Image (cartoon, grey):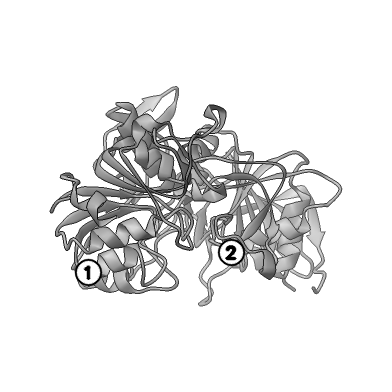
Amino acid sequence: MKLSSTDIARRVAGDIAEGSYVNLGIGMPMLVAEFLPNDLEFVLHTENGMLGMGPRASEDKEDWDLINAGKQAVTILPGGSFFHHADSFAMIRGGHIDISVLGAYEVAANGDIANWSLPGPKPPAVGGAMDLVAGAKQVWVILASHVAKQGAPKVVERCSLPLTGVACVDRIYSDLATIEVTPDGLVVKAIVSGLTEEDLRSKTGTSLSFAQDCLILTPDGS
Amino acid sequence: MTDMIADCPDLKDGATILIGGFGDAGVALELIETVRDLNLRNLTVVSNGVGSGEYGLGLLIQSGSVGKMVCSYPRSSNSSIFEKLYVGGNIDLDVVPQGTMAERLRAGGAGIPAFYTATAYGTPLQAEKETREFDGRNYIMERAIKGDVALIQAAAGDRWGNLTYSKTARNFNPLMAMAASTTLVQVRHFVDKIDPEIVVTPGIFVDRIIETKENN
């Protein structure tokens, strides 16, 4: 059994404390916003200059001055604000953003992350990823699949791809498990139902320990 | 607009041009396309991206005026202009983390030659930069960016050069306005005056303003 992308997004959303300032990366991390409880308040930051980002704009209300970092037309919620890029990244670099949620190609046992550059002729593009992983108080990584297409582990002893940041990841949410990065190595806090500890180890490129109160996750099937 | 550009001695071959905008928000399209018509060579362009399509910065790059791009995100979902030149070895690229680029511009405008940041420490973008430890954490030294000319888009401007912006179209524009020798601005509305309490870019950073009614 595996968790779907919405299962993972729902889990991440459930772990974000009320009142947090959160930056959700482009792609799957954006899905987390849909599962933040409506009766609690969170403040979403988008690095192109807004706090209090709301949902995507409906097609008839798109305003191309009001976009997110993925260049989609969005909305702003009451209490929101606009600012320039230096202030936006002062919020990140200065440790004012509580949680950065982003995707990755690889995460290492010590919290190193590689998520910006793949081999090949295409121009490398980093955007704000290096600033976010170095600056946010907490860095949570979503892996839509625990292993790469060819079966190679994404959670590894040492990253083989160019690094985005060193020793900065705090938590990994994959389709198979939730893993904390601790000074004593990786600790599995939750594992998908039907998967044994040995199964998870065989899909992971570094050693794992399991929390005493390790949760069993059941996919919602949605 | 052609007059305003023609009378700008900083716009010359080899110049460093700062171009505001993020995606299509806050991009001075008309100014960029007027600069393209000058057919300059070997420009260094500092901008977050490489243009969203076959207009604006994309066209300036396609024209062969740009020798080097300094940017954080040299990819475009709607255009392969930059990628073709890059893969063919016909344009230089300096990839800079987005926040580092913003702060380097701010520093350039504020008279600060360099600063330390943890961003990119231990990554390939650290390159040969000086490193230093402060309070147990490692940082790299980043140099300020200054431009010869900035091309800025703003919502409103007055005759003193004061500017306001629209929503997330602000992005890099106020920083680039500070960091260039000559700052050229296109505004949607040229107004008599702007409430001093809401001015975002004070006029001291602005050299010339032109009103464009185009859809941007």
The residue sitting at 41% across, 52% down in the picture is: A163
Q: Nearer the viewer, residue B99 or A193?
A: B99
Q: Nearer the viewer, residue B147 or A89?
A: B147
The residue beneath circle 2 is A27
Residue A7 falls in which quadrant of the image?
bottom right
Report the chain holding disc 2: A
For numbered disc 1, what is the local secondary structure?
A: loop
For numbered disc 2, what is the local secondary structure?
A: loop
What amino acid is found at the position of numbered circle 1 in the picture?
Ser
Report the chain holding disc 1: B
Query: x, y percentage for residue A98?
Result: 64, 39
Number of on-image labels: 2
Q: Is residue A106 visible?
A: yes
Query: x, y percentage for residue B115?
Result: 34, 30
What amino acid is found at the position of numbered circle 2 in the picture?
Gly
Q: Is residue A32 above or below residue A40?
A: below
Circle 2 Cα neighbour tier, 10 Å, few/some/many (<14 / 14–19 / ≥20): few
Q: Assess whether mark 2 and mark 1 are in contact (beta carbons under 8 angstroms).
A: no
The residue sitting at 35% across, 60% down in the picture is: B30
Q: Are marks 1 and 2 on the same chain?
A: no
Q: Marks 1 and 2: which is nearer the front?
A: 1
Q: Is residue B189 left or right of residue B144?
A: right
Residue A17 falls in which quadrant of the image?
top right
Q: Is residue B100 visible?
A: no
The residue beneath circle 1 is B63
